[in-house]
Structures are given as structure tokens and as C-alpha cells.
Image (tube, coloured by chain):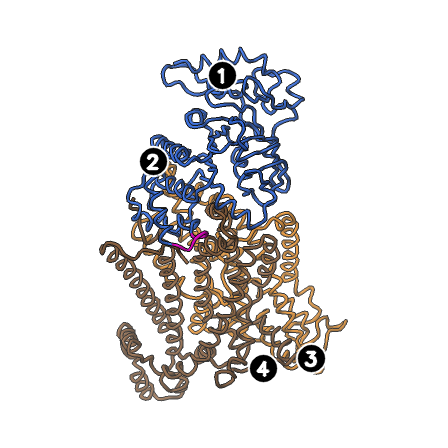
Amino acid sequence: MSATPEIPVAGHVVTSRLRIRGGDTLIAISAAILAVIVLVAILAPLLAPYEPNQTDILHASLPPSSSHLLGTDELGRDIFSRLLYGARLSLLGPTIITVLAVFLGTLTAIYSVWIGGRFDAAVARGLDILFAFPSLLIAIIAVSIFGAGFVAPVLALVIAYLPYIARVVRSVALRERNLAYIDSCRMMGFSGIRICGRHILPNVRGMIAAQGTISFASALLDLAALSFIGLGPQPPTSDWGSMVSEGSNELLNGAPAQSLAASGAIVLTVVLVNLIGERLATRAARVVR
Amino acid sequence: MSEGRRPLLRIEHLQVDLPVAQEMRRVIHDVSLTVAPGEVLGIVGESGSGKSMTARAVMSLLPDGARVEGRLDFDGRPVAELDVKDLRRYRADDVAMIYQDPRAHMNPLRTIGSFLLEGPLERTKAKADAVARVVKTLKEVGIDDAERRLHQYPHQLSGGLLQRVMIAAALVAEPRLILADEPTTALDVTTQQEVIAILAEQCRDRELAMVLITHDLDLAAAVADRIAVMYAGVIVEDAPAESLYGGPRHPYTAGLLASRPHLDRAARLQTIPGRPVSAYEAGPGCVFASRCPFVEEEAKVVRPRPRELDGHIVACHRAEDLREELRTRSEEATSA
Amino acid sequence: MTAVSVSLSGPRSVHLHRLRTVAKAVAGRLLTILIASFVVFMALSAAPGNPVRLVLGPKASPAARAQLEHRLGLDQPILERYWNWLTGVLHGDFGISLVYKTAVGPLIGARIGTTLLLVAYAAVLILIAGLGIGVLGGAFRRAGAPVAGLTGFLLGVPSFVAAQLLILFFALDLGWFPAQGAGSGFSDQLYHLTLPAISLAIAFSAWVAQVTMTSVREERIHEHVDTARGRGMAAPLVFRRHVLRNAAVPMITVSGLTVASLFAGAVVAERAFNIGGLGSLMLEAVSGKDYNIVLAVTLILITVFVIATSVIDIVQYLLDPRLSKGGGR
């Protein structure tokens, strides 16, 4: 479990008549805003007015103005530029985690179900054990072994989120595998890969997309939390989580700009991603029915 | 129809609309029925005819957002005007409903005993009495080891047993009217006969009125005093059971009779062409117009009003003309 | 409550069978903890960097190093070390902290109280708010959309973000609560831990509320609810007995998972509010490569999680007769 909870895919999704009517526009707007955020992150070097780590003690702790959109922090760095640059790591991390977790999780699940027997039982048991670890804990252990930074938390969270994807894929794969038509495929001599690719994967696509999206949001929150407690990218590199941490001292001293800006960025991105994730989950659940 | 006694249930020009996907859809166009005390009325119709909704209207248990027009009186009092307390008492004491799928209609986490005693314990604090009554009723519906069953859970009983429990629950409330919505459809054929027999016997013994809703015309004919045939939210024919069974006056009824498979000889299965429509799908004229073999132009435009003919109430423009035609057809169909 | 209660009488073989299933499940869970501790032990032991080096510094003599290694048991084969550690743990001995140079057990003992209080406080808030809002959102049709919207938003507010806002408003602006620290003495601690508990509670409450609301809504449309209404029972009674009771299992599951996850989440809250609890101990251990502490705290967290999931399983088993009583017509 992460510091903020992982949202299971099926069985909790909230639908309401009001939502559905304006739903599609909401999703479209969310996706658009997210696209803008991603674009901003990519184009940060072009868009940022200052270098993110350029200190300027003479102009420290300035309030927002026309030259510094969000003001400056205690070391005189432009908060707006830091926010833009911070987006890069804050978005890159979850992306890597999601892609790897989905890839490895799906592979593990399908392979395991395909082989079946004791191998499958062992894999299931292994996944169960992984579930007993809160994701934050896995990351902390990884950091204590490999040191803080970007890599250790990201890899650790891949391992932490893998079981969620694997479980979703496993349940579908198990169900599909037992259907008669898979046996007839085997009898006709289709190779395992072909069966998996043609018949099992398409049924699971929707749920993977939903779970993956939701995992992205969780990963973002987890990585931000890890950065906040100091186990993420070390200074001078900073992402949104470290900005909140660095900003918290300033907040106590009456300059909340950095902390709030980074917090807002995190919440905005997570909420938008969750909106899309929930919509994907509803759609996936409908297909199953 | 028994003359001179006030009808227990009187429905006049009932019209029901339900909210479906952001719009209101008509499920019952115009239904008028009466049930006398102790009388068994069978409502026969295919899916979509609105028969279940009629029962729910009687219980005042329509889905949220339903719009109801028309009159529905129980023992002279309009059900729609009952306040919350009176409505509860009406549902607890006067009417009881038996549902099609007993397993879905019982809480899987509670015992059979809890289910059966829920109703009575609302009315009385004397638990021992209530338990005794429940046990007695269970035995009357053919469950001998009643005490043991009280401690069991629904998933431990078969469908047939569960339906008997459902019947017992309805009887324990000592209602004056029982609404049985396809009580045997979910059961296998042998159990069907047993359950229906129990139901009919209990109603006779206790002098209860019953509305039996079914798609099975034979079943209705075997049990009911009177049969109302429903199609697309309209009662197309309403007559004493024997008379309707032997001599239908409406093309749809005749079609239903004719479309039953023959058990005695090999003959091509007759069907009514097309598929049953729901009330909101039916056009402006007669609801059966699209499938009626005797349809004429008038029927496509003007909805026929129910009128009396030979002791039947029929909603058909050509009822008189078709009398002979329908009689020959049904004789062919039922000749053994 | 129930007119006819769950029958506990039954053939003895049924009891034995049930005991055996429960025993098997418990054993399985213990095995999970064991394997997990083994994996973590191995991982930490295989870590790069030499703790001896850290403690003695790079200029220490080989003899001093060898002596310390022997004292710490680092010269033994790894399996033996694991065994020693495991047996030690079962006796309450968690080893020595490299950083503090004292036994780990008492270190944890001193700090765990604060964390427990924080977690318990947050849990109470979460359960009241989350379950309450969830039930309300499920019971009233029109409440569905606003509750869904609100909880959807709050799910995106992690505890450290909530902490910033809470500190800003309630500590700095309004001065109602202290901004940092854990306080001493029970009521003072409660006072200090209020904002931290709330910060943890926000996202978790949203989650609990969502699951609860969905569960209640699903149960509300089950046919057996209609049956009860149709028999003239009062609406609140029907809701309590047939909707809530049936919705209880997912509600309990999510509550249990929440409590289990709170311990891990406490790490973040402790950092945000500068509280000296188990979480901050863990963080210090991580930067100081104090593996005994890391191991010990990991073991505690995993055990809590496993206990929580076991309790959930047991409760589910007790609440749903379909699980405990097989068919038997």
C-alpha cells in the first residue's frame, strides 16, 4: 500500500447519472490539460524564464511579481521555473514505473497462467507476499540498500505495483484459459504466444489500461512522498515532492509559495489522471459484463 | 365475477410511466381489473406486457421516479393516498407478494427463520407465538422439518424449497390478497406443479384472493377463476377462465392458445409472427396491430376500447366478426 | 437484532473442519511474514557499503575492523546470521543499532507509542468520516454525485500536501493547533497530533467513503431489499438490516486495509510535522545505514499488514454464512 491508497479497479468505481451526462466533456478537458502539463514538462528549458537552481540571495523570498511569476524561494531561485523543471522528474518517474509494471506484470501473469501447475502456484504465492508490503516500505528498503535518488525509488515502486497489474491480468487470463475455445486453439496447434496475443490480451486490455492509469496516479503520489521525506532525487535536482519539502520551511516562515505551488501541481495532475482512470475502469467493467 | 360483493381490489385505467435512460417510458397504457375477495385472477402475458409492473403498482413498490395515473383501490381505499404508516400496514397486513426468483429476494446473510419472522415480529412482541405460527405455516406448505430449516441459510435450500418458504412468508402475514409474480417460472417442471398446487390449496383454504401472474396460459387456466390477458401494457381480454380457455374472443388470446406445443400429435408449431412489444414500443392504434392476422386499417390508428361481449371484456374492433373464426381455430388447437 | 440468530450448534466435524481452515490460513500468513523477513534480510545484507566502515571510519586498522565484524556477527555465513536474527526476534531481541549504539528494541519501544497514537487517532477520524460520508452518499440518491466528486478530488491530496495546508491555516493563520512536534503527556500529544492525524485522514477517508458508497448503492438495489419493503417494514430498519449489514464486508475490508496502510503513511506525516515516532526513526536508520532498525521496523509493518488482512478474512468468514456453511440441503 502506498502512503495514499491504491485504488482497486473493479468493484469500487462510482458511477452516477449526473456524471455520465457531462462525463465525456470532462474527460476530454482532463486529457487536454494533462497534455498541456506534459508538454510544459518537455519544453521546460524553453519555457522557464530562469535556471531552476540559480540561486540569488539578494532576491530571496520575494512574493509573486511580473518578473517572478510565483516569487522566489529562500535561496532566491525562481519558483515558477523550478515548477516547470520539476514537472520533468515528477512525470517521468510514474511513467517509467507504469510502463515497466504493466509490461512485467502482464508478462508474469500470462506466462504464469500459461505454464500453470506448481509454477503458477509459486508465482501466486510470491505475489501475495509482495502485497503484504506497503509500497512506501519497499521503496524505503530499496533506498536504504542503494541510496537515495531517482533510480532506487522508481525501481522499487515497479516491484511494488507489479502485483496489482499481475493480479488483474491473472484473473482474466485464468478465466479465459479455462474456456473451451482455448483448448481448441491448442489442439489446432497454435503456439502459446499466438493464443495469448490474439485471445487473452485483447480481453484484458481495458482493465490493464484502467489499472495502469490508476497506478500512474499512485506512483506520482508515492514518488512525491518519497521526495518529500528526502529519499528521492537529491539537491540540487528537485521534483515537486522535494519542492514541497523545501517549501515547508519557508511556509513556516511565512512564504508558502513554493510549497503551495508544488502541492497544487501534484494534486491537479493526480486528480486529472484519476478521472481518466476511473472512466477507463467503468468502460472495462462494462466490457466484462 | 361475483356480483354484489365489493371488489377487494379495483384498478381503473391504470397508467404507468417509468424513467429509463433520461426519459419516461410508458409500461402500462390502460389497465382495468377487479378482484373479488377469495377470487383467483390470472394475468397472462409475455415479457414486456407490463404484468409485473401491475403487481408492483398494487404494492405501491414501483421504481423511483415512476409516474402513476388512474385509480387503484384496495377495499375501497385508494392506495395512492395512503400515508407512510398506513402504507406500511397495508403492505404488512393486507397484501403479500411472492416473487419469481426466491433466491434473489431473500437476504443471503440471514437465516430462513429470520426472514420468516421479520414480518410477524413487526406486529407483535410475542416471539414464541410468532415462531409457532411460522412453524405451522411451513408445515402447511409441505416443509416438515420446519424447526431445522429455521436455522438454515438460503443457499442451503433448493429453489423449490425456497419458493415454499416465500409462500409461507406471504401466508404468515395473513393477507387478504396475494400477488404471485411468476412463482414457478424459475423452478423445474415437477416442482412447479407442487408449488402451484400448494399455493392454490392455501388460497382456497384461507379464502384468500390471489393475482397469479404468469406467461403460461395453461397454468392460469388450471388455477384461476378469471383470466386477464395482457399485451403491451393493455388488457386485451378479461373473462372467466373456462370461457376464455375454451373460446377466446381476442386474436392474441387465440394466438397464445394456438401456439402451445401439442403433446399428443406431431404438428407444426404455430407461432404469432413477430416479437412481443412493450407498451412504449406500440404504435397509436391497437397494440397488437403489428402482429394481428385480422388487422384492418381502423386498428392501426384507433386504439380499441374494452367492451363486453358474451361475458368477456375484449379490446378489439372486430371482436364480433371474429367470434366464429376464433372459435374454429381454438377448437383445432385444443382438440385432443 | 436477528430474530433467529446464527446457529452455533452443529456436528462436531463441521467445527473441526472450520478450525482447520482457519488454522491453515493463519499458518499461511505466518509463512508470508517469514518469507518476507527472509527476503528483506537477504536484500539488506547484500547491500553495497560496509557498516563497519561507516562506524569505524576508513582509517581503522584491520584488527579493529575484524573485531567489530565479529562482535556484530558479520563474519558468519548469511543463513546463520538470519537464523540468529530470527531467534533473537522471537525472544524480543532485535539487535544493536549501529547509530545509537543501543539495543534496537527499547529504541523502538520508546518511539512506537507516538506512532501508535497518531495511527489510532487518524484511524478513528477516517472511519467516522469515511464510513459516515460513504453511507450517506449511498443512502441518498442525490448525494451520490457530490460525494463522488468530492472524494475523487480528495483522493489526490496526499498527506504531506494536506499537512502544508493544515499548517498554513490552522497553525499559522488561526493558531488553533501547533505546527510541529508531538508534545508530551497524553492530552498534550492528542493536541499536537490533531493536525497530523487530519492530514493522514483526508485521502484515506475519501477512499473509504468511495468504497462504502459503492457498496451501499449496490446493496440497495438488490431484490431482497424490495421484499422487505414490500412486507411493510420501515425504511430505516430495512436500510440497517438489509443494506448496511450486507454492505459490511467491503466496508470492513477497506477499513482494515486503511489501518494497515496508515503505519507506512505515518512516516510521511511524522516528517511533515517533525514528530519523533517510528517513522522518523526509520528514516534516520535509512540514512545511517542502520540495518537492524530498518529490519525491525520492516518486520513490524509487515506483521501489522498481515494481521490486518487476517482479521479481515476472519470477519468476512464470520459475516457471510455462504463461506462457513457449505451446501447441505
Q: The orange chain is which one?
A: A
Mark 3, other Cα within 10 Å: few <14 / some 14–19 / many ≥20: many
Chain letter of the residue beneath label 3 in the structure image? A
Q: Nearer the viewer, mark 1 or mark 3?
A: 1
Residue at the spot of label 2: A187
* Residue contact at pointers 3 and 2, CB within 8 angstroms: no
Which image quadrant for residue B261? top left
Residue type highlighted by circle 3: Ser
Give, as a single range, the part of the protein colored magenta.
B121-126
Picture quadrant of residue C165: bottom right
Q: How far apart are marks 1 and 2 (CA)?
A: 59 Å
State the mark number for residue B247: 1
Locate residue C232 relative to residue A64 in the image: left or right.
left
Q: How many numbered callouts?
A: 4
Kindly indicate whether the residues beneath marks 4 and 2 are on one polypeptide chain: no
The residue sitting at 58% across, 34% down in the picture is B11
| Mark 3, residue position | A61
- Chain identifier matching the brown colour in the rendered picture: C
Q: Position of residue C97 (x, y in %)?
A: 38, 83
On screen, residue B166 versus residue A259, left or right, reads left
Chain B tint in image: blue
Name the subunit of mark 1: B
Helix, strand or loop at mark 2: helix
Q: In this view, does A40 lie to the left or right of B6?
A: right
Foreground pick, C163 / C143:
C143
Measure the alpha-carbon separation of dots 4 and 2: 71 Å
